[in-house]
Amino acid sequence: MLQLENVTVTQDDFRLAADLTIREGARVAVIGPSGAGKSTLLSVIAGFYPPASGRVLWQDRDLTDLPPGDRPLSILFQDQNLFPHLTVAENVGLGIRSDLRLSPEDRGRVAEALERVGLSGMGDRRPGTLSGGQQSRVALARVLLRARPLMLLDEPFDALGPALRAEMLDLVAEIAGAMGATVLMVSHNPADALRIAPETILLADGRAHPPRGTAELLENPPPALAAYLGK
Amino acid sequence: MPSRLTLMAGGAAAFVALLTLGTLAAVIARAGGAGWPGVADWAALRFTVLQAALSAFLSVACAIPVARALARRRFPGRGIFITLLGAPFILPVIVAVMGLLAIFGRSGALNGILGAFGVEPLSVYGLKGVVLAHVFINLPLAVRLILQGWLAIPAERFRLAAALGFGPRDIARHLERPMLREVVPGIAVTIFLICLTSFAVALTLGGGPKATTIELAIFQAFRFDFDLGRAAMLAAMQLVICAATAALAARLSLPPAFGAGLDLAAQHWDAASPLSRLADAAAIGLAALLLLAPLAAVIAAGLPGVFRLPLAVWQSALWSVAVSLAATALALLLALPIALGRGRVLEITGMLPLATSALVVGTGLFLILRPVASPASLAMPVTALVNAVMALPFCLRALIPAARQVEADYARLADSLGLTGLARLRYLTLPRLRRPLGFAAGLTAAMSMGDLGVVALFADPDRATLPLQLYRLMSAYRMEDAAAAAVLLMALSFALFWLFDRGGRTDAAA
């Protein structure tokens, strides 16, 4: 269970308040107009931006003062998810040990993870030689090996075309299902949210509203969301 | 990582502060006070500022037409010429001086031509010579930096200007002059600063009461009078004007360091007139002549004799390579933690050597270390140490922007993966900094290889670096050997730079 307990975030004259709970194993979309603070909310959970007040808890454990790498989560950013100077296998191996001292057994797991995301045999390539979709798969293979219970997606597939994006979302759902992970996904595309996230957090008017059913929310959007969706 | 890194960065900065300010303090303490400047000292100050100002002004003024010509013309050999413009900065100063003497000296090529027309021979010593040498060294640097400014003007602007029917005058007014106002002050102040602490040029072409720089006066105070108090006072004087200049330079913008992508030439529609073609050809031709003729003269005079050089010269070449490699390793060990640690205090400390007298650093070190070791055995290690510290600002200038870029691009990802400590250094920082590290190493190695400074004060007769050996050959008028040694020195400097710089570029696929 992920809890945002009376969290407030301030950045210059921007303010965001969040007081909500996400069940373990839930898949939740985060929707809202641009500038509402979707990425900021994820940054706070991931530990890149300290909240002005309040606490972030996972299974009742306070995460607020933990550095990003020690939090029970994996995050995928909009870009720069891979180190271009390391090979695909090294990038994935970072999910096992960040000092990359991998045993033969670990290497086997890296190969397995690559196979799982459909990239078997590509371990020696550099990210620059892969397509955008393949790069996303590498990052997902690393998420798989990190095996953290919480997955944060900050629009990592945004640069991909619609078909490829749908494919990646299905892969996310599959991986999260296999790991039993809780997913929190920023999206500005209602179709994406409907596709894999049964619940949605709406960010509007300086507030992150508690999760509601995605389909229901999109059918009866409150005024702020309706304006954003153009309905 | 932060705590350990902060510790290492602080340690490196403290070491640099000890070497720069601590050595000055040691000299002052030994002298029992620093005294007050006399007539000769004020004269040295005046000459130093005058020659530096003239050198900076002439370098920049001559560089502008050359940079403009290179920005708007494409011709075969343009790329090679731009690469060659990087050479004088890593050319050993003493070799540059030899080349200039071969062209502009009393029996040089120019006076030969003038003599044929019955013109009195020109003298290349004193203010004229010092400024000429500084322009020779810094003009190419200025051209490269200004060219960068020119290429930073988006090509679309020139297209728009052509669409609006701008003539050359309008382009100068709306595009070029605003750019120049932006970049030229920073470049001029940088060259001014480099010329303020000039030693080898002043030692070989200056001298006498009318043409002595502060650094040369410090040398004379040590060497001839062993007047530590006067040397310390002069060093303090130098520190003040250099620090003030450096503070000024820090407020002015420079184009991003040492230019990538200078091979581009934006298409220009404004330069089709025959007159502008002629002007550009003349600018490039004259710059090439000034740059290449002295080098060609040295090579022509020295190349045949290289393999007949006496054994002592080869020995000093070995010493120089050893000193240069040690200085390079040390400079990187100091520069890397400072560049990664960031923070104002660290950066300012790292720039301190720009304001410091290398001779005072060396002498201070001798005074500090004398109780534990004999001066003769210290000459080479102290030279390496001083060279490392003096190269530090240039290393930092290459490393700090790159380190910032790595942080901006990958810090979040590395943090989210818990990549810290040595693993972060090995898998993120070092691979991403390969190029600037290679460049910084090459620069340090070449500068140290060609340095004629501290070693001139302390080396004993049978152990010398190659530049010192070359200076001795010149002083003894053994010009044939001197020219051959100059070729050897130049080859070693360029080879060291090339090897390190190249090393940073291999495997740079990503």
Image (tube, rainbow, N blue to C red):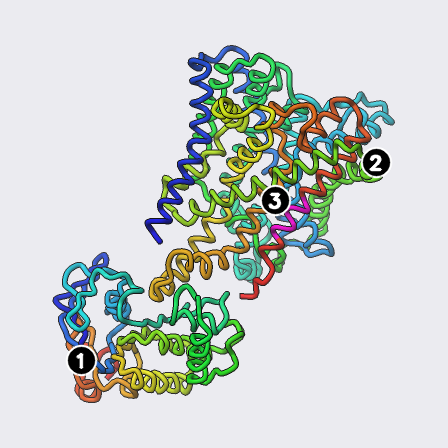
Quick check: can you spot residue B58?
yes
**Residue B37, horizontal then vertical, whole percent:** 48, 13
Q: Residues within 10 Å of mark 1 (few under 14, many from 20)?
A: few
For label 3, the residue is B143
Helix, strand or loop at disc 3?
A: helix
Query: Mark 1 sits on what residue?
Result: A23
In depth, the one of A32 and A41 nearer the eye is A41
Q: Is residue B122 left or right of residue B398?
A: right
As shown in the figure, which amino acid type bears the numbered disc 2? Arg
Instruction: Give residue A103's position: percent from left, percent from top.
Output: 44, 71
Which residue corresponds to the image point at 40% horizontal and 75% vertical from the top-left?
A139
User: In this view of the protein, which residue sits in the foreground, A189 or B493?
Assistant: B493
Answer with mark 2 or mark 3, whichever residue precedes in sequence: 3
Can residue A206 be seen from the camera position used here?
no
Q: Secondary structure at mark 1?
A: loop
Per the rendering, the mark at residue B308 is 2
Residue at the location (80% across, 26% down)? B478
Residue range highlighted in magenta: B494-501
